[in-house]
Image: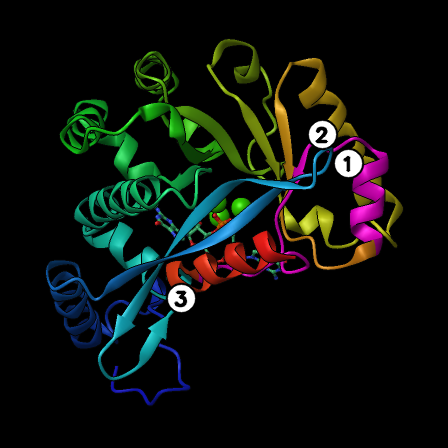
Amino acid sequence: KNTGKNKSLHYEPEHEKANAAAYIQLETELRKAIQEDQLTLYYQPRLELSTGQIICLEALVRWNHPVHGIIPPGEFIPLAEESGLILPLGEWVLRHACMQKKKWLEAGIINYQLAVNISPCQFQEHDFADKVIRVIDQMHIDPSFLEFEITESTIMHNMDKTVSILERLCDYGISISIDDFGIGYSSLSYLKHFPINCLKIDRSFVKNIHNNHSDLAITHAIIHLGHTLNLQVVAEGVEELSQLEILRETKCNTIQGYLLSPPISAQELELLIACKALS
Ligand code: C2E
Ligand code: CA
Ligand code: CA
Ligand code: CA
């Protein structure tokens, strides 16, 4: 699409025919973006409520487009998944998250875990775990600093295959969290069998915990479930103090959200940490 800065580049699969030319153009541009490092990672801190410390950063990809500026992932991840470009894109994200981590370690400034989002398509690759291990080994980085965020749909897609990949990643030292927990499939039995460390309560529940009884009840139930199974629980999308207070009372372990910080660039994050150290 030939869009201006404020218009959407969003690709909608149902309009595939009408937009065939636009699709191909965007796909070509995205392929180029991956090769030419037009992608960039933003980081959103995750705060531990019991200590008030940041313990993890979620890496979230952006496309720094030469004409359109910063494009959010919702506008190109679906295209990447449909075209297969998610595989090189996912590898780019992992590699760059590791490179950034290494830089921060060497500078001695930021020592948190890094959470990386993994698309269901990546899990379907026969050699996904091998690739991951190769990339991390090459970087000489301790895999235990890494967490992969996967969704319930990834797990449900091919449970036997997924469990063997997760077990390999877990043996290697990577932690696993379930992203958008609660909006996916209803079966919970996988929680017993899979090497999972953490549940991330979907933002749609957290959004109304301070004024909707059902959302509060569901959030409560997820926290309780998580703790019973010995899992960490993260609340996503915390925007207001009243939500934070409720999550603190219900013993949620950690929070992410605009209240603390939106996703920010590595540079902005370094500034934020430096200011925190001074205060
Ligand atoms: P997600 O993994 O559920 O990430 C959380 C999204 O919620 C992020 O949007 C974040 O900016 C936004 N968010 C965080 N706190 C708040 C809040 O307090 N209020 C509201 N309204 N929103 C909040 P973002 O960065 O646009 O990412 C959207 C989605 O794109 C992600 O959802 C994830 O599914 C996907 N994504 C992002 N980066 C990657 C990546 O590197 N690989 C893959 N496969 N997917 C990615
Ligand atoms: Ca996520
Ligand atoms: Ca999420
Ligand atoms: Ca998501």
Assign the C terminus to one quadrant of the image.
bottom right
Q: How far apart are marks 2 and 1 (CA)?
A: 6 Å
Q: Where is residue 176 in the image (x, y as percent from the top left)?
A: 45, 26
- Residue 218 is labelled as 1
Q: Which one is in front, 96 or 227? A: 96
Q: Which one is in front, 125 or 32? A: 32
Q: Is mark 3 within 8 Å of ligand 1?
A: yes
Q: Which one is in front, 19 or 212? A: 212
Say what amino acid the circle numbered 2 marks.
Ile
Say what amino acid the circle numbered 3 marks.
Pro
Q: What sort of colour scheme is used for the picture? A: rainbow
| Start-end of magenta stretch | 242-264
Q: Does the stretch in magenta take in 220?
A: no
The kind of secondary structure element at disc 3 is: loop
Crowding around mark 2 (Cα neighbors within 10 Å: few <14, some 14 to 19, many 20+) is many
The kind of secondary structure element at disc 1 is: helix
Q: How far apart are marks 1 and 3 (CA)?
A: 29 Å
Answer whether labels 2 and 1 touch (C-beta < 8 Å): yes
Q: Can you tell which quarter of the image residue 34 is in?
A: bottom left
Q: Position of residue 166 (x, y in %)?
A: 36, 19
Circle 2 residue: 222
Q: Can you tell which quarter of the image residue 227 is in?
A: top right
The kind of secondary structure element at disc 2 is: helix
Circle 3 residue: 72
The tag earlier along the polypeptide, 1 or 3, is 3
Residue drawn at x 16%, y 76% as measured from the top left: 21
Say what amino acid the circle numbered 1 marks.
Ile
Residue drawn at x 64%, y 15% as measured from the top left: 230
* Residue 179 relative to residue 207: left or right: left
